[in-house]
Image (cartoon, rainbow, N blue to C red):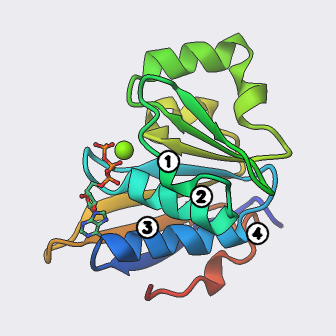
Amino acid sequence: MVGEGRPQEVRVALADADATHRLGVRLGERLRAGDALALVGDLGAGKTTLARGVACGLAVDDPDGVSSPTYLLVIEHGGPLRLLHADAYLPQKLAGFLRDGGLEYLFDPAAVAVVEWADRVRNLMPERTLWLQLANDKHGGRAAVLTATPGDFPWLGNLPKIV
Ligand SMILES: Nc1ncnc2c1ncn2[C@@H]1O[C@H](COP(=O)(O)OP(=O)(O)OP(=O)(O)O)[C@@H](O)[C@H]1O
Ligand SMILES: [Mg+2]
């Protein structure tokens, strides 16, 4: 049954920043209204690079305007499908906002939500979230691991492993 079983896991090697961007573009092209993408990774892992790629894939109006929303909490980018870009680097701030009604704003069924440092507000993320972990590889690049409940993102298994 959909929603049960082991999480579906897909690994993608990202040799350089352009590859991180391209993975974001591919995700942005596939994400649908109401989807949530959780980005996890240390300082400098490539979360914002990936989010900018997602913005390009969604064809938002100002993809180059995507930057870390640390102090603004959520930045909205208009377009055919709106992008709500949030950051939980300061988890108390984002969690407070979300608990005060922000959940409905961020996880709008008509928009796509991308949350950096989402592991810091894990219990506030929707159950149906695509998790993406970025980590350094041995060669100066990054390794991405995408995780979801099987069936939640049906295209996940077909995502090209080489970007
Ligand atoms: N696959 C990659 N290989 C090598 N460098 C990369 C890769 N992806 C991104 N970078 C580079 O890593 C640096 C940090 O990227 P970025 O700002 O997107 O990270 P971040 O996770 O948002 O960082 P922070 O947590 O500080 O906001 C940038 O210089 C970016 O070009
Ligand atoms: Mg960032």
Residue at the (43%, 23%) spot, across then down: 71
Mark 1 or 2, nearer chain start: 2
Q: Which residue is mark 3?
A: 145
Query: For the residues marked 4 and 3, what is the alpha-carbon distance in whole angstroms?
Result: 17 Å
Amino acid at pointer 1: Val
Q: Which residue is mark 4?
A: 151
Q: Nearer the viewer, mark 2 or mark 4?
A: 2
| Image quadrant where one finds the N terminus | bottom right
| Category of crowding for the residue at label 3, using alpha-carbon neighbours closer than 10 angstroms: few (below 14), some (14–19), many (at least 20) | some
Q: Nearer the viewer, mark 2 or mark 3?
A: 2
Query: For the residues marked 2 and 4, what is the alpha-carbon distance in whole angstroms?
Result: 24 Å
| Category of crowding for the residue at label 1, using alpha-carbon neighbours closer than 10 angstroms: few (below 14), some (14–19), many (at least 20) | many
Residue at the (78%, 54%) spot, across then down: 81
Mark 2 or 3, nearer chain start: 2
The image quarter containing residue 50 is bottom left
Q: Position of residue 68 (x, y in %)?
A: 41, 39
The vertical placement of 72 against 153, above or below, is above
In the rendered structure, the answer to whether residue 26 lies left or right of residue 34 reads left
| Secondary element at image label 1 | loop
Q: Nearer the viewer, mark 4 or mark 3?
A: 3
| Image quadrant where one finds the C terminus | bottom left
Q: Which residue is mark 1?
A: 66
Query: For the residues marked 1 and 3, what is the alpha-carbon distance in whole angstroms?
Result: 22 Å
| Secondary element at image label 3 | strand
Count of marks placed on residues = 4
Residue at the (63%, 81%) spot, across then down: 157
The vertical placement of 24 against 40, above or below, is below
Amino acid at pointer 3: Val
1 and 2 marks in contact (CB < 8 Å):
yes
| Secondary element at image label 2 | helix
* Residue 7 visible at all: no
Amino acid at pointer 4: Gly
